[in-house]
Amino acid sequence: MSATPPSSALPRQIGPLRHLSIVRALMLRELITRYGREGLGFLWVIGEPLVFCLGVVLMWNLIRPEYEHGIRLGPMVMTGYMALLLLRHQISFSLSALQANTGLLHHRTIAVLHLYAARNALEFLGTTAAFMVVYLLLGFLGEVSPPHDWSLVFGGWLLLAFLGLGLALIFSALAQRFAFMERIVPLLTYALIPMSGAFFMASWVPPVWRDAYLLIPLPHAVEMIRAGVFGPFVETHYDGLYALGWGLVLNLLGLLLIAGARDRIEAE
């Protein structure tokens, strides 16, 4: 009797281009399923975060002074809120990625990781496009200046998405194993507000607490984005390599936790 081969997160018999085409097809399917073919349709991928971000920036401009700690609040809130939105969308939409697409796993060429990759890529592209549109609108209104260093902005944004992917995989795997996690994770995402530094700068944290605060990897990515936007005239604190190391650990842990997801679904 031949032994059953061990399952893997990705089928090994297909090449990288085939993996990309599968993820692309799943992204298109997700767009149609979520937003439909009529009306604005897929434009809501951009429009939804765009509306939320503009609303938050407008609210802060109405209730807070234009400058705080010598920093203009418009671009500070915009960068922080878009970073927070990216993280929360990655986590929240990854939670249901497996349950909503269980039927697709009957196709042996579709792997669990394809489902997570498609949803995270879709959220990344949509939020990135919204970020760019918000930036252009605020620039047109005179609220922000062109970024001082594009490489820092893009580097910080990619690093943030990498950290978000790791968190999304971990939370999704835990929710798959423990039913109560599906209710707890949405509450835990609110902890991202202080943990990410979305609405304050690391330089605003008292020095006695700053080193402890910067043990959290998320603020490093957000501070990188703000360093690219504001330039050297605004004090920022970040270590890209430290955050990248955390991203590798989180993603590796997430991959290990979801490795047997297909087997558990087939056993149910």
Image (cartoon, rainbow, N blue to C red):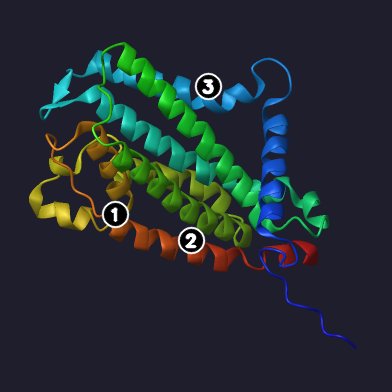
Which mark sits nearer the N-terminus, 2 or 3? 3
Which of the 4 quarters of the picture holds residue 156? top left
How many labels were placed on the picture? 3
Q: Amino acid at mark 1?
A: Gly
Q: Residue at x 59, y 60 (%)?
A: 178
Q: Is residue 21 above or below residue 105?
A: above
* 148 or 44, nearer to the observer: 148
Pointer 1 residue: 240
Q: Secondary structure at mark 1?
A: helix
Assess whether mark 3 and mark 1 are in contact (beta carbons under 8 angstroms): no
Assess whether mark 3 and mark 2 are in contact (beta carbons under 8 angstroms): no
**Mark-to-mark CA distance, 1 and 3:** 30 Å
Q: Residue furthest top?
A: 141
How crowded pointer 3 is (Cα within 10 Å; few <14, some 14-19, many 20+) is rated as some
Q: Secondary structure at mark 3?
A: helix
Which of the 4 quarters of the picture holds residue 264? bottom right
Which mark sits nearer the N-terminus, 1 or 3? 3
Q: Residue at x 55, y 47 (%)?
A: 183
Which mark sits nearer the N-terminus, 2 or 1? 1
- Looking at the rendered image, the quarter that the C terminus falls into is bottom right
Left or right of 263 on screen, residue 74: left
Pointer 3 residue: 47
